[in-house]
Amino acid sequence: MKKTLIASTLCFAATTMLSGCVIHVGNASAQEGEVISSVFGSVDVAEHRSVGDLSSVNGNVSIEDYAQAEDISVVNGGVEIGSHVRIDDINIVNGDLDAGSNLHVTNSIETVNGDINIEKQSTIQGSVETVNGDIKIVDSVVENNIESMNGDITLKGDTLVKGDIIYKMRDEGWLERNSTKPKLTIDADVSIGGSIILERPVNMDIANAALQEKVIVSYSSSK
């Protein structure tokens, strides 16, 4: 992960910090661009609101339709996003991301142990990365790479990935102890601008023969 999530989540300078409750950002007194942090509680941003950074150590983050936020950091909890939402950056350690249609992320989406589900007409200007979670993207654009170690990747509809799809390998010893292969599924109308780089064994279901030619196997066949 590019960020130290725990450190960023626990950095509470100039923030609103509450614990053991739900922080609801939607009343008339809430300030635009407000930074919200929670230790033991969830964060809920109402529709059409615009806030700054959102972080939670133990709790979910929910953002309703047409809202905006800067960076989202969650240690133990999921992130649920409505439609037509704009976010700068999303980082999750243990939890899933479920996003509605027309999501716009200025930078990247990263999880360690959590699935990433992105619905139609969304645009991710950076990369989509996970270690152990599954990635599902429908009719959307990823302007950089999609990367995973151990999770399934499913690309549906007319999804466009301008960069590479990369399955990374942690180390040979780890691979020997974990023989289950992740699965890469790519529908016929999906476009990949870069390559499909496999640093570990992967089960593949690629409907378009032209995309099959983009596969680069960079591990020994004996693994």
Image (cartoon, rainbow, N blue to C red):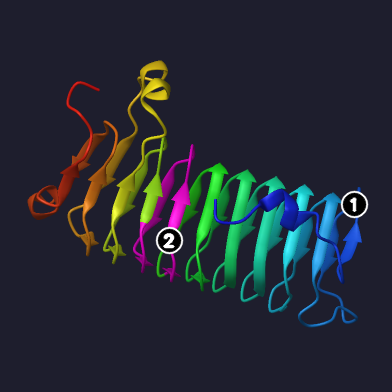
Left or right of residue 211: residue 53: right
On residue 97, the disc is none
- In percent of the image, x 42 and y 37: which residue is there? 151
Left or right of residue 77: residue 14: right
- In percent of the image, x 51 and y 44: which residue is there? 115
197 lies above or below 90: above
- In percent of the image, x 43 and y 71: which residue is there? 125
Left or right of residue 68: residue 173: left
Instruction: Specify whether residue 174 is painted magenta.
Output: no
Instruction: Specify whether residue 136 is painted magenta.
Output: yes
Question: Picture coordinates of residue 131 (x, y %)?
Answer: 48, 41
Quarter of the rendering containing residue 14: bottom right
Q: Mark 2: few, some, or many residues within 10 Å (few <14, many ≥20)?
A: many
Q: Nearer the viewer, residue 166 or 122?
A: 166
Which of marks 2 and 1 precedes in the sequence? 1
Amino acid on which the number 1 mark rests in the picture? Cys
- In percent of the image, x 34 and y 33: which residue is there? 182
Mark 1 residue element: loop
On residue 21, the disc is 1
Amino acid on which the number 2 mark rests in the picture? Ser
Mark 2 residue element: loop
Q: Which of marks 1 and 2 is in front?
A: 2
The part of the chain drawn in magenta is 122-145
The residue that label 2 is drawn on is: 127
Number of marks drawn = 2
User: Can you say which quadrant of the picture contains the C terminus?
Assistant: top left
Quarter of the rendering containing residue 156: bottom left
Q: Nearer the viewer, residue 71 or 171?
A: 171
Question: Picture coordinates of residue 77 (x, y %)?
Answer: 69, 45
Q: Mark 1: few, some, or many residues within 10 Å (few <14, many ≥20)?
A: few
